[in-house]
Image (tube, helix red, strand yellow):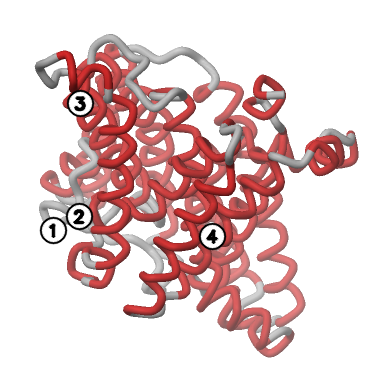
């Protein structure tokens, strides 16, 4: 049962649905196609604009779930060296991330003269390029080069924080600490979730730091242990209690989504019937989308920019064509994400590959700036 649970396609289905929501949120948020097509479906556009971003909380919970499974499935560190685990995570994140940013920088340069809209990024600076290449853009107050890339930086922070916490517990001296390592580690996770949900997540100025999002990420970890536990009700009670207190102190829709996602994962993955239902071939496309959701997430903004520029140039006032343009941008985003997944993300990365693409990002950005000044 545990083996089947850990490989359940249900996780990828959840990621696939969240990915679809995020792409459509950005299509509604970044015009001008959505601005023109708004009268055709104002309620749907408003929902996507205001609430589509909540899907990020689903990714955070699932990210915590998967992190617990890879780093500490039994509650204690399974990795050997903290530095090695962090470095591998950085490289795996950065290679497709840098490839996508190179594409976004090039597309932004191509459409900048024809698409006069706030959604088009301005010419990058050297400081901005370096900060984005190193996942530091928000921490050093530099604009992101693409929509949603802040999440990649936060994911890396959360993973790093988790690795350091488990490594720290493992390094505690004394036989007592070693005997109670599982309790200490899990207790520290629960304390971190409480601090995040009850305090840090209430301060919007902290939203560039892992502590702001640790609550949702940690609920995913509790969900993982609940799924594998002979007594899942205790973990479910912890998830509901931690989230319930947070909502009583300061109701936030994003926290409610995280609690529902974590609880739903436990109930669904503990149910053999639900897991069997998720195995049906009819859901295979959604499962595949979940598997490549990171690549789609990274590349879709460049695709949407390109389609926005084309439609705005040729059919600037047509409601129907702008609505079809949004649909075309969505489909092309999936195709581009599939290409990215097969050609880049699935390949085992290396430091040399990461450094080449980071250097390529900086060099491409500088070349774009120089070219525009000479034009």
Label pair 1/2, CB-CB below 8 angstroms: yes
The residue to which callout 4 is attached is 55
Residue 44 — which label? none
Q: Cα distance, mark 2 to mark 4? A: 21 Å
Tell me what residue is drawn at x 49 percent, y 61 percent.
Answer: 240
Q: Position of residue 350 (x, y in %)?
A: 34, 12
Label pair 3/4, CB-CB below 8 angstroms: no
Q: Is residue 33 visible?
A: yes
Q: Local crowd at mark 2 within 10 Å, few (<14), some, or many (≥20)?
A: some
Q: Position of residue 171 (x, y in %)?
A: 15, 18
Residue 141 — which label? 1
Q: Position of residue 24 (x, y in %)?
A: 61, 63
Q: Local crowd at mark 3 within 10 Å, few (<14), some, or many (≥20)?
A: some
**In-front residue for pair 250/327:** 250
Q: Is residue 361 above or below residue 301?
A: above
Q: Cα distance, mark 3 to mark 2? A: 30 Å
User: Could you tell me which secondary element the residue under label 2 belongs to?
Assistant: loop
Q: Quadrant of residue 168?
A: top left
Residue 169 — which label? 3
Q: Cα distance, mark 1 to mark 2? A: 5 Å
- Is 271 situated left or right of 93 in this image? right
Tell me what residue is drawn at x 81 percent, y 36 percent.
Answer: 272
The residue to which callout 2 is attached is 138
- Is 56 situated left or right of 140 in this image? right
> Which quadrant of the figure contains the N terminus?
top right
Q: Earlier in the sequence, mark 2 or mark 4?
A: 4
Tell me what residue is drawn at x 46 percent, y 41 percent.
Answer: 63
């Amino acid at each position: 049962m545990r083996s089947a649970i850990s490989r359940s396609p249900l996780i990828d289905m959840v990621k696939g649905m969240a990915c679809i929501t995020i792409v459509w949120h950005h299509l509604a948020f970044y015009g001008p196609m959505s601005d023109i097509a708004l009268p055709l479906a104002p309620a749907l556009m408003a929902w996507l604009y205001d609430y589509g971003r909540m899907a990020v909380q689903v990714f955070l919970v699932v990210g915590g779930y998967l992190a617990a499974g890879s780093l500490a499935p039994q509650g204690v560190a399974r990795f050997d060296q903290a530095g090695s685990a962090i470095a591998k995570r950085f490289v795996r994140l950065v290679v497709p991330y840098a490839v996508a940013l190179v594409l976004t920088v090039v597309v932004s340069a191509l459409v900048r003269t024809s698409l006069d809209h706030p959604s088009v990024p301005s010419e990058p600076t050297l400081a901005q390029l370096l900060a984005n290449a190193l996942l530091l853009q928000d921490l050093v107050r530099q604009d992101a080069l693409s929509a949603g890339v802040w999440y990649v930086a936060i994911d890396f922070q959360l993973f790093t924080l988790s690795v350091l916490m488990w490594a720290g517990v493992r390094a505690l001296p004394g036989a007592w600490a070693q005997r109670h390592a599982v309790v200490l580690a899990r207790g520290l996770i629960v304390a971190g979730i409480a601090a995040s949900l009850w305090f840090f997540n209430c301060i919007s100025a902290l939203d560039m730091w892992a502590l702001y999002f640790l609550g949702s990420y940690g609920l995913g970890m509790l969900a993982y242990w609940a799924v594998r536990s002979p007594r899942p009700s205790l973990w479910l009670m912890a998830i509901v209690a931690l989230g319930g207190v947070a909502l009583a102190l300061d109701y936030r829709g994003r926290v409610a989504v995280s609690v529902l996602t974590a609880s739903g994962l436990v109930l669904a993955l503990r149910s053999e019937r639900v897991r069997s239902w998720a195995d049906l071939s009819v859901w295979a496309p959604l499962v595949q989308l979940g598997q490549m959701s990171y690549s789609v997430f990274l590349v879709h903004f460049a695709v949407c920019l390109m389609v926005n520029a084309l439609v705005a140039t040729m059919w600037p006032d047509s409601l129907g064509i702008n609505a079809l343009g949004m649909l075309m941008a969505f489909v092309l985003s999936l195709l581009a994400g599939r290409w990215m997944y097969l050609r880049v993300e699935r390949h085992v990365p290396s430091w040399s590959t990461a450094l080449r693409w980071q250097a390529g990002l900086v060099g491409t950005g500088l070349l774009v700036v120089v070219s525009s000044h000479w034009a």
